[in-house]
Image (cartoon, rainbow, N blue to C red):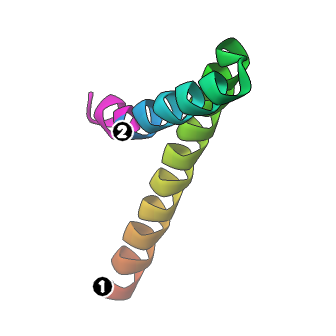
C-alpha cells in the first residue's frame, strides 16, 4: 500500500501536465498518456534513488 501512495503524486503531476499540454496542442488523449508515463517514470526514479540511499546507509552502519 505504501508503494501506491508514493506513485500518486507523480501520476497526478503527469496527468495534469498532460492535460495542460494536450489542451494547448489540441490533442489531450496523446498528452494525458504521455504525461502519465512521465509521472510514473519520475516516481520510479525517486524510488530507486531512495533505495540506493538506504542501502548505502545500511552498509555504512555495519
**61 vs 8: above or below:** below
Task: Residue 27 in the image: state x and y as whole percent.
Answer: 72, 17
Task: Residue 9 in the image: state x and y as whole percent.
Answer: 36, 39
Residue at 48% in and 55% down: 46
Q: Nearer the viewer, residue 8 or 33?
A: 33
Residue at 63% in and 33% down: 21
Mark 1 near mark 2, Cβ–Cβ under 8 Å?
no
Residue 9's label in the rendered image is: 2
On screen, residue 41 versus residue 26, left or right, reads left
Task: Residue 30 in the image: state x and y as whole percent.
Answer: 73, 18
Classify 10 Å Cα crowding around label 2: few (below 14), some (14-19), many (20 and above): some
Q: Secondary structure at mark 2?
A: helix
Magenta part of the chain: 1-8
Magenta span contains residue 4: yes
Looking at the rendering, in which quadrant would you find the C terminus?
Answer: bottom left
Q: Nearer the viewer, residue 31 or 8?
A: 31
Residue 2's label in the rendered image is: none
Classify 10 Å Cα crowding around label 1: few (below 14), some (14-19), many (20 and above): few
Chief secondary structure of the magenta portion:
helix
On screen, residue 6 versus residue 26, left or right, reads left
Mark 1 — residue?
61
Amino acid at each position: 500500500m505504501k508503494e501506491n501512495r508514493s506513485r500518486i503524486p507523480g501520476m497526478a503531476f503527469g496527468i495534469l501536465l498532460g492535460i495542460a499540454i494536450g489542451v494547448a496542442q489540441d490533442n489531450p488523449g496523446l498528452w494525458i498518456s504521455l504525461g502519465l508515463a512521465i509521472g510514473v517514470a519520475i516516481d520510479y526514479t525517486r524510488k530507486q534513488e531512495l533505495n540506493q540511499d538506504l542501502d548505502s546507509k545500511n552498509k555504512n552502519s555495519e
